[in-house]
Amino acid sequence: MSWKRNEPEQPRGYHHGNLKEALVRAALGLIGEKGPNGFTFAEAARMAGVSPAAPYRHYRDRDELLADVAARGFAAFEDALAKAWDEGRPDVETAFHRLGRAYLAFAHDQPAFYSAMFEAGVPLDASPELRNAAERAFQQLRQAAETLISALPPGKRPPALMMALHIWAMSHGVAALFGRADGGRRPLPMSASDLLEAGMLIYLKGLGLPPDKAG
Amino acid sequence: MSWKRNEPEQPRGYHHGNLKEALVRAALGLIGEKGPNGFTFAEAARMAGVSPAAPYRHYRDRDELLADVAARGFAAFEDALAKAWDEGRPDVETAFHRLGRAYLAFAHDQPAFYSAMFEAGVPLDASPELRNAAERAFQQLRQAAETLISALPPGKRPPALMMALHIWAMSHGVAALFGRADGGRRPLPMSASDLLEAGMLIYLKGLGLPPDKAG
DNA sequence: CAGCTCATGTTAGCGGCCCTAACATGGTGA
DNA sequence: TCACCATGTTAGGGCCGCTAACATGAGCTG
């Protein structure tokens, strides 16, 4: 019941009606264009068409909004990784390639989310929601690691958790150092995506996994 | 000539005498304890015992001080890496291990420097000094990569630049995600240093390099 | 040593931000 | 119908970045 407010989108009364979502969208826009530090509570309010004090009805302070953005980012991240991994179909190597590319694509295409998640200095335990969202995203990597490992003979299997951490570290390192479109960082002889792919292939080979067939 | 002002350290007149250095030290302290965003131009001035406007005689704005801190950080970083690598002595594997541990030790022991260098959002081309300092630090990694590669048969040598980028990405990924002492990030089943070491061993094995003998 | 000059300090102040307190509005359920 | 309270408002304190105008004194010049 009560379909009174569904989509209308434009604020029109004394009450905005959807301010929390509007603030998140505004924050994403501002972080995306000016970095996580350039983002301002007051400006987000302005963009949403409300007074500077209104956001405090929805978030304790600026950091809580940032944490919410980060949590939503981790949820979207988990989604993107899950879609890319697709439970290892059609084969593990192909799926793993998609996973790596999806990681970088997310960092590249959703810089605001990625910034809030990893670069804004938001403590992971700012809220249980944030921690859980981050945990679920990481489980995607761990899941992929476990599937890859299962192709190895039992005696030569590394710990899945360690392998997942390696994958994450390499992916984040490439994304953070070389993955941004804008200037300011080092020019590369290859794309960040190719760099990560090459690095992961070497790493997998070091584990004894066969070279991919989906190159 | 003019050893008029060498060490005295304590400000005593109308003129501070060593304000620029004092500001850098203050910035390092503040960044170290409150993160790169918590750092404030005014508070650095207060710590140095001068008025809030004094820093503007030495830095155009807050960002320029941050860039200076980052540049000094890269210089110290280069130094630490060079000392650890020690031109590959006594053997390449041992030296490479020291290099990896030195990378994480720097991120761990000099969090303020590392933050300013990689997490404060300072654009690499904020100044030529900064860019050069970063470049020289990176050359340490590249140097190590080249030496490692030279042990491979000519037909199987990867590009040194790519390998250096992989080393950097993995190291930075581990440092950024797991290398901090304070809470907020994921608890690990192993130390960040061991995690990086294991990852690099697997990576090197994937390149065909022999397992180390300095474990 | 006298005096000038300019690097390096000072105070005053504008505008913006974070956040709180006190008040206003109007949607919702009894 | 109407009272309640979630969600908006204005006002304002304190801090910050930064600029303008002024003050000090270190060191050169003669």
Image (cartoon, coloured by chain):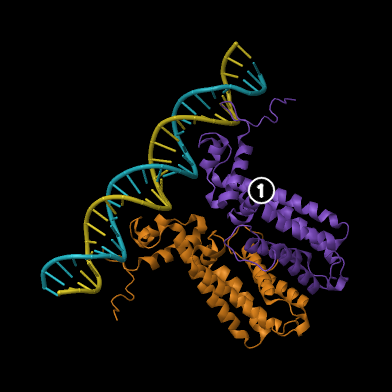
Chain colours: A purple, B orange, C cyan, D yellow
Q: Residue at x 62, y 50 (%)?
A: A112
Q: Which subunit holds the residue at mark 1?
A: A
| Rendered image quadrant of residue A89 | bottom right
Residue A171 versus residue A137: which sits nearer the camera? A171
Q: Is residue B129 left or right of residue B84?
A: left
| Rendered image quadrant of residue B164 | bottom right
Residue C12, placed above or below residue B101: above
Q: Is residue B155 left or right of residue B66?
A: right
Q: Is residue A189 left or right of residue D17?
A: right
- Visible residue check, residue A98: yes
Quadrant of the rendering where the C terminus of chain A is positioned: bottom right
- Visible residue check, residue A168: no
Q: Is residue A104 left or right of residue A67?
A: right
| Rendered image quadrant of residue B208 | bottom right
Image coordinates of residue A168 in percent, x first then y, are 71, 62
Q: Residues within 10 Å of mark 1 (few under 14, many from 20)?
A: many
Residue pushed farthest bottom? B90
Image coordinates of residue B200 in percent, x first then y, are 71, 74
Quadrant of the rendering where the N terminus of chain A is positioned: top right
SS under mark 1: helix
Image coordinates of residue B154 in percent, x first then y, are 75, 84
Name the residue that disc number 1 marks: A71
Residue A114 versus residue D22: which sits nearer the camera? D22
Residue B167 versus residue A101: which sits nearer the camera? A101
Q: Identity of the amino acid at label 1?
A: Ala
Image coordinates of residue B72 in percent, x first then y, are 48, 70
Residue D8 versus residue B140: which sits nearer the camera? B140
**Picture mark count:** 1
Residue A150, placed above or below residue A133: below
